[in-house]
């Protein structure tokens, strides 16, 4: 087994690249909401953050069409 020394770069599973022009926002979810999003993450291979952005986009379009 190889040993890891200080300064070695260790890579985990590939992380999706960060979308351009985003602002970090803290969102509180219920345990049920988070569990459902995690199931979708595995099924759709889409990060939870992307699922939330898409849901917000749909909501904003719906609200805009009501005006």
Image (spheres, rainbow, N blue to C red):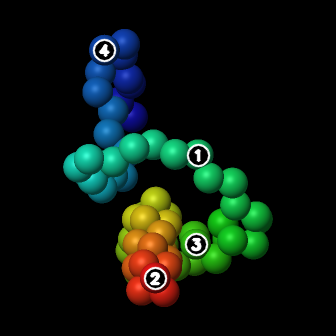
Front residue (pair 21, 35): 21
Q: Which of marks 1 and 2 is in front?
A: 2
The mark nearer the N terminus, 4 or 2, is 4
Front residue (pair 14, 48): 48
Vertical arrangement, residue 42 with respect to residue 47, above or below: below
Tally the numbered discs.
4
- Residue displayed at 29% across by 27% down: 9
Q: In this view, does 31 lie to the left or right of 50?
A: right
Q: In which quarter of the image is residue 47?
A: bottom left
Task: Tell me if residue 51 can be seen.
Answer: no
Q: Residues within 10 Å of mark 4 (few under 14, many from 20)?
A: few
Residue at image mark 4: 7
The mark nearer the N terminus, 1 or 3, is 1
Q: Residues within 10 Å of mark 3 (few under 14, many from 20)?
A: some
The mark nearer the N terminus, 3 or 4, is 4
Front residue (pair 32, 11): 32
Residue at image mark 1: 26
Residue 31, position in %: x, y? 76, 65
Do residues under tags 4 and 1 come within 8 Å of each other at their CB atoms? no
Residue 45, position in %: x, y? 38, 74
């Amino acid at each position: 087994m190889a040993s890891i020394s200080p300064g070695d770069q260790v890579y985990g599973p590939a992380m999706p690249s960060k979308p351009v022009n985003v602002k970090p926002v803290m969102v509180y979810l219920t345990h049920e909401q988070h569990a459902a999003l995690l199931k979708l993450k595995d099924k759709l291979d889409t990060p939870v953050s992307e699922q939330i952005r898409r849901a917000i986009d749909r909501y904003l379009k719906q609200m805009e069409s009501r005006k």
